[in-house]
Image (tube, rainbow, N blue to C red):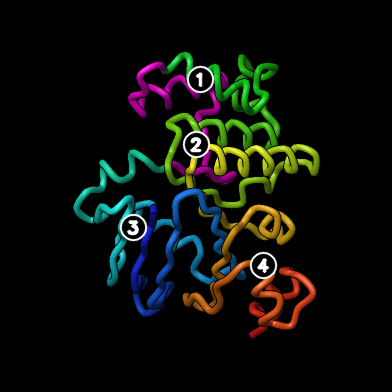
Amino acid sequence: MAILEASHLVKRFGAVTAVRDLSLTVREGEVVGLLGPNGAGKSTTLHMLLGLITPDAGGIELFGLELARHRTEALSQVNFAASYVDLPGVLRVHEVLDVFARLYALRRPRERVAEVIELFELGAIARRRVLGLSSGQRTRVQLAKALLNAPRLLVLDEPTANLDPDAGDRIRGLLSRLARENGSAMLITSHNMREVERMCDRIHFMADGLVVATGSAEELAGRYEAEDLEEVFLKVARG
């Protein structure tokens, strides 16, 4: 079943076309990577898929619902995390999670907050203010916030960029396990090619606003006669 289906998306900013005729699908239980060099159009694509900006052409369906017509219902089953999104610095970690749990209108907000605190090993910092956390700790809080509503689609922009290798490895394993067990889907952008190789079932490579290649890591390496995904990335980025 397709959880997300984007068809022939176009987005222009003045004379610049940031995304041109982009189509992609994310299926239930699937982890999909969206890769490409800086300026390829990844962020613009994510913003369209999250309803933050409106495409100039094309359409987006989430869970079989047209995003343009059923925005609130569709996006209630989606969540997003990125290290560059600020959380309220004066609040304590448990307060941030409690606020979002209530914004998401969860039935048992306290119980769900306790669950994600345990899941992401946040107990030791739960009463610390966000302002005093390290970048890696803030990333874990962001991910915990994004899983509060048990989204059917989780969109992650560089999910482990600020984590040390050990924490990053554990978070990757946790996210992969959740996708398998819950049947939820993930769309991930990352410059960590090993992370993408480990987590993603399929990968879309973007360049100059276009999807130029799609397939598994193994399929793409074979198509580009590359040893690994990092070499594929370099070949795509350099044209």
Residue farthest along the bottom direction in this orientation: 239
Kindly identify the residue that appears in the image at 44 percent across and 41 percent down. 79
The type of residue carrying mark 2 is: Ala
Kindly indicate whether the residue at mark 2 contacts the one at mark 3 (C-beta within 8 angstroms): no
Kindly identify the residue that appears in the image at 80 percent across and 39 percent down. 166
Image: 46 above or below 95: below
As rendered, which of 161 and 27 lies closer to the eye?
27
Decide if residue 54 is on the left or right side of residue 138.
left
Please tell me which of labels 3 and 2 falls first in the chain: 3
Q: Nearer the viewer, mark 1 or mark 3?
A: 1
Q: Which residues are magenta?
A: 79-108
Kindly identify the residue that appears in the image at 45 percent across and 33 percent down. 150
Separation of residues labelled 3 and 2 (CA atoms): 20 Å
Secondary-structure class at tag 1: helix
Which disc number belongs to residue 113?
1
Instruction: Please tell me how crowded label 1 is: few (under 14), some (14-19), or many (20+) other residues with Cα within 10 Å.
Output: many
Q: Which residue is mark 2?
A: 146
Q: Nearer the viewer, mark 2 or mark 4?
A: 4
Separation of residues labelled 1 and 2 (CA atoms): 11 Å
The location of residue 66, given as percent across then percent down, is 24, 56
Q: Which residue is mark 4?
A: 217
Decide if residue 20 is on the left or right side of residue 123.
left
Kindly identify the residue that appears in the image at 64 percent across and 85 percent down. 239
Q: Nearer the viewer, mark 1 or mark 4?
A: 4
As rendered, which of 135 and 150 lies closer to the eye?
150
Instruction: Please tell me how crowded label 3 is: few (under 14), some (14-19), or many (20+) other residues with Cα within 10 Å.
Output: few
Residue farthest along the left direction in this orientation: 69
Separation of residues labelled 1 and 4 (CA atoms): 35 Å
Please tell me which of labels 2 and 4 falls first in the chain: 2
